[in-house]
Image (cartoon, grey):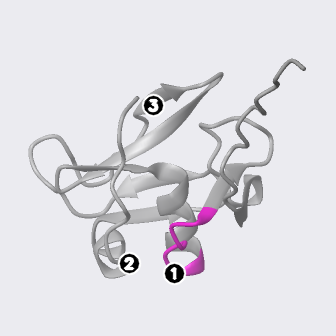
Amino acid sequence: MPRFSPLPKLEVLQKYLDFNPQTGDLTWIKSTGNATKVGNIIKVNYYSGPSPMRRVSIRGQGHLAHRVCWALYYKELPEPHIEIFHLNGDGSDNRIDNLGSREHRPRMKRPVITKV
């Protein structure tokens, strides 16, 4: 499974990307190198579980697109312990109406059952 870096500063995100909250599209407004073109919509998916999610790479660091969208829309970075999730379960649908947030809770470990 890919590893993702913490988001860069909001100013860096705003320098390179534009977010359309109605469509959920992230568009390059400044090139980061040969692989990006100004005006291109980011449509790169990676697969994690049953639903594909979009990712974006800025300065060689991979980031979850829905966290980037959240930051650009609300103009603040989500705290690391805050989970941004897709309300309809479609990981590629980054419309702001489809993104929710909650405090991340570690998954509970299965209890150990001992025989008496």
User: Badge 2, how many Cα within 10 Å: few under 14, some, many 20+?
Assistant: some
Whether 105 is among the magenta residues is no
> Is disc 2 placed on a helix, strand or loop?
helix
Determine the CA span between mark 3 and mark 1. Answer: 24 Å
In the displayed structure, would residue 19 be above or below residue 92? Answer: below
Q: Position of residue 64 (x, y in %)?
A: 46, 49
Q: Which residues are magenta?
A: 74-82
Q: Is residue 26 left or right of residue 100?
A: left
Q: Helix, strand, or loop for circle 3? A: strand
Callout 3–callout 2 Cβ contact below 8 Å: no
Above or below, comparing residue 85 to residue 70 in the picture? above
Which residue has dot 3 on it?
45
Q: Is residue 59 left or right of residue 111?
A: left
Numbered label attached to residue 76: 1
Q: Looking at the picture, how far across and down is residue 32, in whole percent? A: 16, 56
Of residue 33 and residue 57, the one placed in the foreground of this image is: 57
Quadrant of the frame with the N terminus: top left
* Residue contact at pointers 2 and 1, CB within 8 angstroms: yes
Compared with 52, 3 (above or below) is: below
Task: Using the numbered discs, state the Cα–Cα distance from disc 3 to disc 2 in whole angstroms.
Answer: 22 Å
Q: Quadrant of the C terminus?
A: top right
Q: On the image, which quarter does residue 45 sit in?
A: top left
